[in-house]
Image (tube, rainbow, N blue to C red):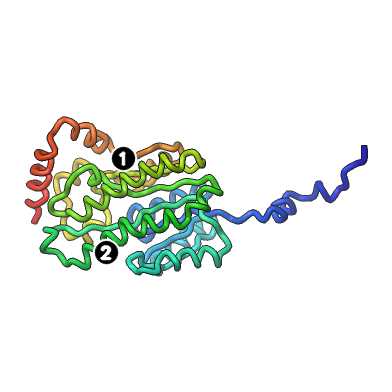
Amino acid sequence: MPMLSSPCWGPLWNLNKSLNVTERVTLITGASAGIGTELARMFASNGHRVALVARRADRLKALADELGGKGCAVPIVIPCDLQQPDAGDRIEQALREAGVEVEYLVNNAGFGVFGLAVARDRAEQLNIITVNIRALTDLTLRFADQLIRNRGGILNLGSIAGFLPGPGMAVYYASKAYVLSFSEALRCELAPQGVRVTVVCPGPVPSEFQDRAGFAPGFDSAILNVAAAEVARQAYRGLMANKRAVMPGFFIKMVPFLLRFFPRSFILTAVGGFQLRKR
């Protein structure tokens, strides 16, 4: 039997080069503050190279410098406003120019505004839909082929609000109901392709979200809140364990269970009465 020639047993990097292996990254939106920043730290500390997306370039650069200074893989910084119609194109182009593919997609970006839907600025509320729903859906479908090819995963930031109607934050609550439904359906569709889909549904989290939404944390925040770093830790572990949903905190886990025992009309009245008292 003829001996195999030695070049066939060259260094592993030669094999990788011949197979044209592309570097894989974790794409995280809304990475400049709150849960998004903590998710970036969590993924990076577990060996993932992260691509950071948010509006504020200075904060993204500071976070990238922080992660790089800790010995993590150098992050890719993509300053981008997801409210802009070309946001998906810009993100895709930046990743293409960096020569990377998406292995994990973290749709964290989102915001809400507090007040009566008919009284708030219409354009502002439509932007909630643009960021919380349209951008999330666009990026998910846009990078689906890469996620399937790399047998990766999707982590969507939902909310306990997704289980409830939300008078006082009607558009925000409805957007999170979409995130929950879309995530669960997509999980079923992508499971045969080896892609994990997890939705994390926290309650109130101390962050810039409340300031932007226009309300001060109240009693609900005191009993339901979990720190952003803990939300990120549980979310990461849940995704890696292929959990359907992650609900950080004991009281948060009880909410969907308790909702089964009350008529929808009662829940609507109760949530409306509680939220509208904040006005």
Q: Give the residue drawn at x 50%, y 67%.
A: 93
Residue 202: x and y in percent read 28, 44
Task: Give 27 or 210, whichever is nearer the viewer.
Answer: 27
Amino acid type, mark 1: Pro
Marker count (numbered): 2
> Dot 1: few (<14), some (14–19), or many (≥20) neighbours within 10 Å?
many
Q: Which residue is mark 2?
A: 127
Residue 15 x/y as whole percent: 73, 51
Identified at 34% across, 44% down, the residue is 200
SS of the residue at dot 1?
A: loop
Mark before the other along the chain sequence, 1 or 2: 2
Asked if residue 50 can be seen in this view, the reply is: yes
- Numbered disc in front, either 1 or 2: 2
Q: Where residue 17 appears, x then y in whole percent? A: 70, 56
Toward the front, the furthest residue is 189
Find numbered disc 2 in the image and state the secondary structure of the residue it sits on: helix
* Residue 261 position (above or below residue 89): above
Picture quadrant where residue 63 is located: bottom left
Q: Which residue is pictured at 48% across the width and 50% down the height? A: 104
Which quarter of the rendering shows the C terminus?
A: bottom left
Residue 72 visible within the image: no
The answer to whether residue 238 is above or below residue 122 is above
Instruction: Specify whether 190 is left or right of 172.
Output: right
Q: Nearer the viewer, residue 189 or 125?
A: 189
Within 10 Å of disc 2 (Cα), the crowding (few <14, some 14-19, many 20+) is some
Residue at mark 1: 248
